[in-house]
Image (cartoon, helix red, strand yellow):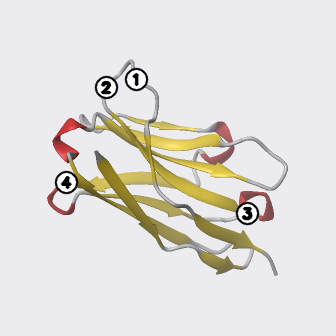
Amino acid sequence: QVQLVESGGGLVQPGGSLRLSCTASGRIFSIYAMGWFRQAPGKERELVADITSGDSTNYADSVKGRFSISRDNAKNTVFLQMNSLKPEDTAVYYCAARRNYYSPYTYWGQGTQVTVSS
């Protein structure tokens, strides 16, 4: 099993920045990739960004150039740096992990709220 704990959400004004953190524990050697998803009220959960164990990254078109995903292997932590935030970025952000290239995201954190509002 893998446990994921997120932190770093909050309220920020449009144009501001936040950094989310996700720390993994448990069978972390089995993790192939970690990602950040978000779900806004009335909308489906969507992938924001993910990063593989080989540091390959992938971003949703809506956040390219504004968000950056990175990892600190020594601390088993993945970060999501969010810049130039917009009201439409408001959502609950979830950290997730998957075991290999072919598996879905199986492990999920509890979520952290990000609200972008003036």
Q: Secondary structure at mark 3?
A: loop
Viewer-closest of 57 and 31: 31
Task: Choose the circle earlier in sequence order: 3 or 2.
Answer: 3
User: Which numbered disc, 4 or 1, marks the residue closer to the eye?
Assistant: 1
Furthest residue toward right: 42
- What residue did someone put label 4 on? 73
Give, as a three-letter code, the residue at label 4. Asn
Left or right position of 82 against 79: right
Q: Secondary structure at mark 4?
A: helix
- The residue at 34%/37% (across/down) is 33
How busy is the neighbourhood of tag 2: few (under 14 within 10 Å), some, or many (20 plus)? some
Q: What number is the disc on residue 100?
A: 2
Give, as a three-letter code, the residue at label 2. Asn
Q: Quadrant of the N terminus?
A: top left
Q: How far apart, in angstroms, are the residues tagged by discs 2 and 1? A: 5 Å
Q: Is residue 11 above or below residue 4?
A: below
Q: What number is the disc on residue 90?
A: 3
Residue 91 appears in which quarter of the rendering?
A: bottom right
Q: Is residue 104 above or below residue 89?
A: above
- The residue at 40%/23% (across/down) is 103
Q: Are marks 3 and 2 in contact (CB under 8 Å)?
A: no
Q: Are marks 2 and 1 in contact (CB under 8 Å)?
A: yes
Furthest residue toward top: 102
How busy is the neighbourhood of tag 3: few (under 14 within 10 Å), some, or many (20 plus)? many
Task: Choose the circle earlier in sequence order: 3 or 1.
Answer: 3
Q: Are marks 3 and 1 in contact (CB under 8 Å)?
A: no
